[in-house]
Amino acid sequence: MRNLKMIKRTLLFGLLILTLNSCTESKKNSSEFIYENGNSSVELKILNGNDYLTYDTPIRMDFEWKNIDPKTASIFGVGIKVLGTKNGITKTEINVPSNYSESDTLNIKLRFEFNGEKIGTEFNVPLINKE
């Protein structure tokens, strides 16, 4: 009888751990840098896998456009270099100098046309110092 209770507790504990782990995995796959309007969106992806930038370090980033023509888009921010656009993805490299003193957040502004209307949005990306 005691063995049966112990087995049930162990199984419940195992299921709890699996459930919690799957919740954290799903959060890792979602982006916090996304603008959506109906079935159209633009998503900023930091290609090194982090959700922050590092001062004085060149970091590649992609802007993925869905149902928005990237030819109508402008990207503004300190240290941003546009490398090119192909297949709905604008490739950029960002290198924020350490003397950027506004805050430890890089404000990236986007302007683009959607259904003939000019839209503006922004992403606030955290900045950290090199370790």
Image: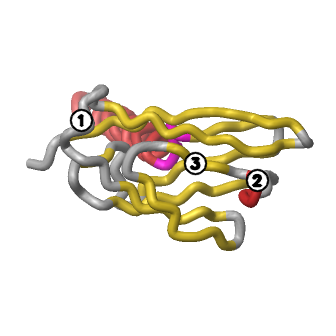
Q: Pick out the residue farthest to the right.
A: 116
The amino acid type of the residue labelled 1 equals Asn
Q: Kindly identify which residue carries mark 1.
A: 3
Q: Kindly identify which residue carries mark 2.
A: 72
Within 10 Å of disc 1 (Cα), the crowding (few <14, some 14-19, many 20+) is: few
The amino acid type of the residue labelled 2 equals Thr
Mark found first going from the N terminus, 3 or 1: 1
Is residue 44 visible to the viewer in this orientation of the structure? yes
Where does residue 58 sit, x and y in percent of width and height?
30, 61
Instruction: Look at the numbered disc 1 and give the secondary structure of its residue.
Output: helix
Within 10 Å of disc 2 (Cα), the crowding (few <14, some 14-19, many 20+) is: few
Q: Main secondary structure of the magenta part?
A: loop
Left of 14 or right of it: where is 86? Answer: right
Instruction: Look at the numbered disc 3 and give the secondary structure of its residue.
Output: strand
Where does residue 76 sit, x and y in percent of width and height?
53, 44
Instruction: Look at the numbered disc 2 and give the secondary structure of its residue.
Output: helix
Residue in the image at 63% along x and 68% along y: 85
Q: Kindly identify which residue carries mark 3.
A: 75
Residue in the image at 24% along x and 57% along y: 57
In whole angstroms, how far apart are the C-alphas of marks 2 and 3?
10 Å
Magenta part of the protein: which range? 29-33
Left of 118 or right of it: where is 32? Answer: left
In whole angstroms, how far apart are the C-alphas of marks 2 and 1?
67 Å
Where does residue 123 sit, x and y in percent of width and height?
51, 35
Q: Does the magenta portion include 49?
A: no
Q: Nearer the viewer, mark 3 or mark 1?
A: 3
